[in-house]
Amino acid sequence: MAFSDTFSDGDLSYVATHRRSSLFTADIERSADLLSDRLSEKRILITGGAGSIGASTLRELLKFRPRAVHVVDIGENPLAELTRDLRSQADVPLPPDLRFLPIDFGGPAMQRHLKDEPAYDQILHFAAHKHVRSEKDVPSLLQMLDTNALKLDRFLRWLPLYGHEGAEIFAVSTDKAANPSSFMGASKRLMEHVLFASGAQGAPRRSTRFANVAFSNGSLPQAFLFRLARRQPLAAPEGSRRFFVSLRESGEICLLAACAVPAGHIVFPNLDPATNLRPMLEIAEGVLAHHGLKPAYYEDETAAIRAVESELANGRYPLIVTPLDTGGEKPYEEFVGAGESATGVGLEEMSGIPYEAFPADLPAAIEALAALRDDISRDVTKTDVQQQLLRVVAGFRHADSDRSLDQRA
C-alpha cells in the first residue's frame, strides 16, 4: 500500500505547521501491516465522526478496507455532508456496510443501536465539547462535562451489556488535560480516567492528547478565513502559542494511536516547543500574507470594524491584537502533566504516557457530577463543579477571569 506524504494543493496547513508534507507518513508506512491486521474486515463504530478529526480519521482508516463502519454524530448536517463527500470520491474505498447515524452517543437511541448490532471490533470516540468558551456559565459547563465524561461513562457501561465487551476503544483527549487550567481541560482529564477505568478488566484502551488542528471546524485559524470572507477584522491573542498539526495529520495520529501503540497509553506527537509552538498572531499574519494582504494592527474592536474597507484599499487588513486574559486560557501548550513520564511507543514521531491507576474517588465524583447536572432544584456554582473535579483531577487550577471568549471578536 503506497502513501503520499505531501499535502494537497491549496492546503493552508503550512501557514500553521510550517510543514509541506505529513510528519507521520513514515510511521504509517512502517505500521501498515499492523494497521491492516486491526482494521481490515473489522467492524468499526465511530462516535462524533462528522467532526474534523473524526472525519479525517475515517478517511484514513477506509484505506484499510474494514467490513463495516458505522458513523454516529449528533450534527445532522455535517453528517449528511460527510456522506455526500465520501460517496462522491472515486478513490475512496467504501465498505459493504457503511452507515451514518444522526444520534446522541450517550442517549437511548445509541443504547438501542448497540443492542441490535453484532459485536464491534474497534470503537473510535471523538464526540466532545472542545472549546474553553464552553465554561462561560454553569449550564454550558454542565453540558460540557456531560458530553466529555458522564455520557462516556454511561456509553462504556452499555458495551458489555450488549455484547461489545471485546471492542478495543480509542478516545481523543487534549493537550489541555495536562496540568489543566480550564474546566474543559479538567473534563478531558476526567474523560481519560473514565476511559481507562472502564478497561481495567476488559479490552485495551488508548488515547491521545492532541495539538490544535489547523483550519479545523471551530478553530481560530478557520475563523480567520471566515472573517476575511465576510470582510470582518481578524483577532488574535498576544503571547498565545500553540502546537499545530494538519487535518490529515490529525487522522494519522488517531489511526496510529488506536491501532499501533501499546494498550494503556496516552500518546502525543513529538513536537518540539522550541520550534513547533507557533504564536497565534503569527498565524493570523500568515493567513493575511497568503491572501496578499499586510496586517494593520488595532487594539480597539470598533475602530477595526470601521476600518476594513479603507485598509483593504491600501492592501492592508485590520488585525485586532487582544490580551490573553480570558478564563481558562494558557499562554502555551504541553502534553505531559506533573507526575507523568513520557516513554517510547515504537513510533518515530509519537511518544506516550503510561496510564496509572484511576483515582479511588472516581465513581463517587462521577455520581456527584451527575447529581449536579440532574438536580435542577439546586443552585449550582462553578465552585461546586470544581470541588468535585479536584477529587479526581490532580493539580487542577482554574485560570479565573471575569472575561470569556464570547466577549471577543
Image (cartoon, rainbow, N blue to C red):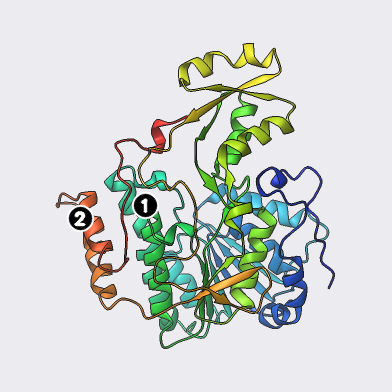
Residue 261 appears in the figure: yes
Residue type at mark 2: give it: Asp
Q: Residue at x 63, y 59 (%)?
A: 250
Residue at the outermost front position:
274
The image shows residue 34 at horizontal and vertical percentages of: 70, 82
Pick whichever, 315 or 45, lies toward us: 315
Label 2 residue SS = helix
Pick whichever, 305 or 226, lies toward us: 305
Which of the 4 quarters of the picture holds residue 51?
bottom right
Label 1 residue SS = loop
> Seen in the image, is 239 located left or right of residue 405?
right
Q: Residue at x 35, y 58 (%)?
A: 145
Q: Residues within 10 Å of mark 1 (few under 14, many from 20)?
A: many
Q: Is residue 161 above or below residue 48?
A: below
Pick whichever, 177 or 223, lies toward us: 177
Find disc 2 in the rendering and name its residue. 384
Q: Is residue 259 above or below residue 139?
A: below
Give the CA separation, mark 1 to mark 2.
15 Å
Residue 51 appears in the figure: no
The image shows residue 290 at horizontal and vertical percentages of: 73, 33
The image shows residue 79 at horizontal and vertical percentages of: 59, 53
Residue type at mark 1: give it: Ser
> Seen in the image, is 334 located left or right of residue 185?
right
Find disc 1 in the rendering and name its residue. 182
Viewer-side label of 1, 2: 1
Q: Residue at x 50, y 62 (%)?
A: 335
